[in-house]
Image (cartoon, rainbow, N blue to C red):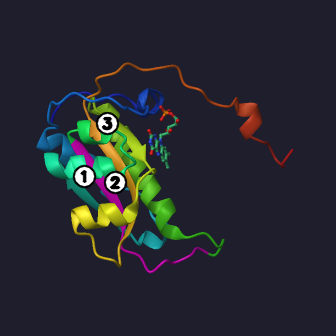
Amino acid sequence: MEGDFMDIFTAIKERRSVRSYKSTPVEKEKLDRIVEAARLAPSACNFQEWRFVLVTDTLKRQALMEAANNQSFVAEAPVVIACCAETDEHRMRCGELCYPIDISIAIDHMTLAAVALGLGTCWIGSFYPEKVRKILNIPESIKVVELLTLGYPADSPQSKNRKPLKEIVFYEEWK
Ligand SMILES: Cc1cc2nc3c(=O)[nH]c(=O)nc-3n(C[C@H](O)[C@H](O)[C@H](O)COP(=O)(O)O)c2cc1C
């Protein structure tokens, strides 16, 4: 795939949760680039515990929608990515688990790569992991951490609702 891509700041600005999708399939070349963006993400001790199940099958996507609390756009999106972890549940010295952080970074890489390719995504945390496990034949030992919908957006951007920097950034000390 040749051509100029948007810069990272534009991709960050334009990324948004897309909850309505065109039925247009996502080209294999674009899917490959998106999972490559996940593969290149950093991870604690470079453990790379993330695993991804790419789903395009209509019946499976319909079942995933039901597993995702009937959020209808989950079936509408031409691709759903089940973001999983094959993990020993390592913790960093700071006490936090590695895998949810690592997989989140990889997912964020995918969401930004998707924007650069003209696609939209939505993180889905509202789902029942046991149902997803059954639908996709995911072994008991694997964590099902998040779902990600992917496809060409059929809606238009809304303005972003974010706290101002002064509420979230402190300089030199907490105040
Ligand atoms: C971990 C995580 C889980 C989320 N789960 C859902 C979900 O189940 N359904 C949904 O519609 N949006 C979900 N979202 C999207 C958020 O609601 C959205 O990112 C937030 O409202 C900010 O909007 P924006 O993504 O358009 O900037 C999730 C986002 C994250 C990061």
Which of discs 2 and 3 lies nearer the camera? The answer is 2
Going from the N terminus, do you reach mark 2 or mark 3 first?
Answer: 2
Give the CA distance from mark 2 to mark 3: 12 Å
Going from the N terminus, do you reach mark 3 or mark 1 first?
Answer: 1
Residue identifier under label 2: 67
Residue 37 showing in the rendered view: no
Q: Amino acid at mark 3?
A: Phe
Task: Provide the secondary structure element on which disc 3 rests.
Answer: helix
Q: Position of residue 140 (x, y in %)?
A: 33, 77
Residue positioned 62% across, 30% down in the render: 162
Q: Residue 73, labelled with which disc?
A: 3
Residue identifier under label 1: 63
Is the residue 80 above or below the residue 87 in the image?
A: above
Residue range (magenta): 79-92
Give the CA distance from mark 3 to mark 1: 12 Å
The CB of the residue at mark 3 lies under 8 Å from ligand 1 = yes
Q: Position of residue 56 (x, y in %)?
A: 16, 47
Whether the magenta-drawn stretch holds residue 83 is answered as: yes
Residue 10 showing in the rendered view: yes
Is the residue 155 above or below the residue 61 in the image?
A: above
Q: Are marks 1 and 2 in contact (CB under 8 Å)?
A: yes
Residue positioned 32% across, 29% down in the render: 20
